[in-house]
Image (cartoon, rainbow, N blue to C red):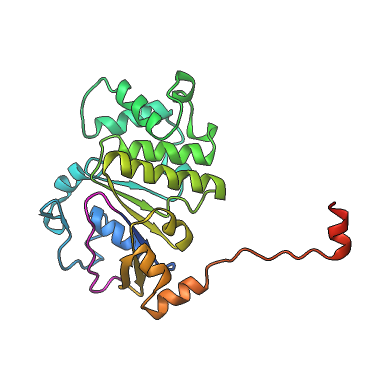
Amino acid sequence: MLREVELEMRRGEVLGLVGQSGSGKSTLAMAILGLLDRKRAQERGVIEFEGCDLLKLGERELRTLRGRKIALVLQSPQSSLNPALKIRTQLKETWRAHAGEPDCESVIRGALESVSLPSSEEFLRKYPSQMSVGQAQRVLIAMAVMHRPALLIADEATSALDVITQSEILALFRELNRSSGMAILYISHDLASVAGICDRIAILHEGQIAELGTTEQVLTQPRHEYTRRLLAAMPKMPTVTLSNSAAAGTR
């Protein structure tokens, strides 16, 4: 449950939202997108986006914003993509949902190239099951940035990836941010990945913002005890010591 959360994002910045499972990270993302069940969740306050209070908008108005002005990339690409549709079809449907233009081949190819994927006919004819997890995640990102949103919410978008692919996706997010000026809310429980791309970090603890500051300040001069515990829990590279016989065998 979120309580008294006050958070501001600057245009074009990358803000990391960090917290353990159950702290309310995804709830905040769903609130911004207007996807919380309003019959079960009580929403109070203001969520201001480009001068508009999102909490006062109806479902029809929110649909015009989702995917066009505010985009979302989720954790599991294989479950987010439709397994029965080819990649070209899914990209076309994403574009037409807000643009309505019948001819979007150039936009599709440009979106794929922006995330370092091939735009060939062979690739566009593929189904999600015919791609690696990393490629599928890049397709999701391509779909998210097709309309050049002002805000991209990446909710645990790299946690299902191996270390090398995760590093590539993080670099891709940073490049998209720099090239388009798109703001990114990067949600993760992994401080190491957040440190690599974020300008500022917000620490969410028990539904409240425990700490907010620049990446350098939060990582080197944490003010809150919970932040210090998170930093202490970060994995460290093991130290390997070779015995004399083992060392001799490596020569």
Seen from the viewer's position, the closer of residues 69 and 246 is: 246
Instruction: Tell me the quarter of the image containing the N terminus.
Output: bottom left
Residue at image point 41% right, 77% down: 226
Residue at image point 44% right, 76% down: 228
Residue at image point 37% right, 33% down: 114
Above or below residue 80? Residue 103 is above
Apparent side of residue 24 relative to residue 122 in the rendered image (left or right): left
Apparent side of residue 174 relative to residue 135 in the rendered image (left or right): left
Find residue 148 and report its image quarter: top left
Q: Position of residue 219 (x, y in %)?
A: 42, 68
Above or below residue 17? Residue 75 is above
Residue positioned most to the bottom: 225
Examine the rendering and report whether any part of residue 2 can be seen: yes
Q: Position of residue 177 (x, y in %)?
A: 32, 44
Seen from the viewer's position, the closer of residues 112 and 240 is: 240
| Residue 27: in magenta span | no
Above or below residue 238? Residue 179 is above
Seen from the viewer's position, the closer of residues 183 and 189 is: 183
Find residue 216 and report its image quarter: bottom left
Apparent side of residue 142 relative to residue 132 in the rendered image (left or right): left
Examine the rendering and report whether any part of residue 36 can be seen: no
| Residue 7: in magenta span | yes
Q: Position of residue 92 (x, y in %)?
A: 32, 28
Residue at image point 25% right, 30% down: 96
Q: Which residues are magenta?
A: 1-13
Predominant SS of the magenta segment: loop
